[in-house]
Image (cartoon, rainbow, N blue to C red):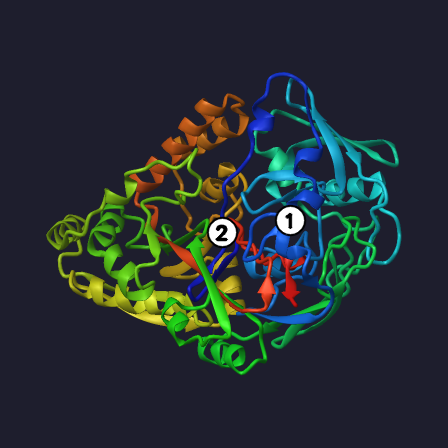
Amino acid sequence: MKKINRIFSFMMISVLLIGVLSACSSSKNEAEGSPSSAVTGKGTGDAGKAAEAAKGGSIVVIVPQDPDYLDPHLAVAAGTSEMMFNVYEGLLKPNEKGEVYPAIAESYEISKDGLTYTFKLRQGVKFHNGNPLTAQDVKYSYDRLAGKDTGKPLQPAFAGIDSITTPDDHTVVIKLKENNASFLTSLIAAVIPKNYQDSNKKPIGTGPFKFVEYVPGQRLVLEKNPDYYVKDVPKLDKVEFRIIPDQEAALLALKSGEADIFPRIGTEKLDELGDDFKSVSAPQNLVQLMTFNIARKPFNNLKVRQAINYAIDKDEIINGVALGKGTKLGSNMSPIMSKYYEAGLEDTYKTNLDKAKSLLAEAGYKDGFSTTLTVPSNYKFHVDTAQVIVQQLAKVGIKVKIVPVEWAVWLSQVYQGRDYDMTIIGLDGKLDPNDILNKYVSDSKNNFFNFSDPAYDKVLKEGLKEIDPEKRAALYKEAQKILTNDAAAVYIMDPNLNVALKKNIEGYKQYPLYVQDISTLYLSK
């Protein structure tokens, strides 16, 4: 789970290409989506302009939060992957369409039964310490994620691995215990050097940029990887991610020339930019929601949760907080996931104060009740949303006190400790619908909602094994309906991603994932 920022604090989701896994016959995938072709895709510039790029230079990118871990296998915060996307790579890599393509792998085959994945590694890939990448590094990394030594998988998708073998230095064979239709997309997970124990202090990956330094509360600095296996990538020499939680301070840094890119800039601040800047704005694969601690009264009562949904006016929030730049949601899925998205759920709980009061009375709360709403203070978008919701719930007798907390406190208290009444957060998108929805499974370790429904668990389990694409899509649509009918949360919107850039920056790409891809950027002459 990962999260967030003004215009959004969130972590995000994504369109996906999982068709490969749906094949019943052996499939082979290679060059079409190679890294060399992917970096010349659409952005603020184009391939023609790329020829006019001035090589070198450095930029400063504003981010609102510190990384939680530099070790990619331990990190859960979306803001971490936003930066470290440029340092680490896996066997596969996502592009701006949410498709996966070979990265450190050159090609792969999937057996007819969907249980065996064979990868041929790309020649000439080096780690940032200069050592060549081999199949043993992949085995070590993915065995670590699977918890082979500890018995505790670091990522759920890897728990289903039966074995990883390395017939030679450039071949990796992964065998699964049972069919997993979402497994392929999990292989974007980072590969690190075999037996390397210092990832949280000095990260070493194979990506286009190398780690230089991290100063908590100030900056994370990366420099060009001269040995990157894609020719002429990256073009920039250096990038600094400047940690500025406050939106006003961030805007001042951009306008004064201290920073060059301001991702997730508030919509209302776009009008304050001068002629030296340009901007892009588009829907992102992210779900902003207000969640309940369903294990705590009164939120363990379905009628209370439904009443709150009826009391919330999502249109007012979208127009007032996002200035209209947001897509209303009804469950934990963005329309960007078009194949799996269940349309119409956004109208399930149309604002109806009389209905809300009636449900509260039926639940034994005729006069309402008092509660708290914990919000990460560094995400103004969520704080502003909370202020609107407090006013809306007051109309049905629910008195809400906003409790702002620092991001680290939110992670430890709310996400990990599940000690809260209600909270507002953004859930980032993934490359597979199972990875978006599995956090609601009863025994999921990131089920901080404490949601539990046997029917939901059954549908998710079936969706994970179903290889027929149409049947699989139908299962995930059914899962969304269950979340909506159970009022598992108040699903508010997928807010647009606004990015402000200096005019001389070209090649910027927007992803349906919570990442900043610096490898495609260049400074125009």
* Residue located at (53% from left, 53% from top): 510
Rendered-image quadrant of the C terminus: bottom right
Q: Is residue 452 above or below residue 390?
A: above
Q: Position of residue 457 (x, y in %)?
A: 44, 33
Rendering quarter of residue 122 = top right
Up-down: is 40 above or below 396? above
Of residues 328 and 257, the one drawn nearer to the viewer in this rendering: 257
Q: Is residue 502 left or right of residue 352?
A: right
Provide the secondary structure element on which disc 1 rests: loop
Name the disc covering residue 40, or none: 1
The amino acid at mark 2 is Met
Residue type for callout 1: Thr
Find residue 440 and report its image quarter. top left
Whole-angstrom CA distance, mark 2 to mark 1, is: 24 Å
- Do the numbered discs 2 and 1 sit on residues whose CB atoms are within 8 Å? no
The spot of residue 367 in percent (x, y) is 14, 61
Point 13% across, 52% down: residue: 361
Please give the name of the residue rendered at 74% of the width and 53% of the height, measured from the top-left corner.
207
Residue at 48% over, 67% down: 278
How many dots with numbers?
Answer: 2
Q: Residues within 10 Å of mark 2 (few under 14, many from 20)?
A: many
Residue 88, placed above or below residue 379: above
Left/right of residue 58 with respect to residue 264 in the rendered view: right
Does the image show residue 371?
Answer: no
x and y percent of residue 342 in the render? Answer: 35, 36
> Can residue 73 be seen from the camera position used here?
yes
Front position in the image: 259 or 429:
259
Nearer the observer, 34 or 249: 34
Residue that label 2 marks:
12
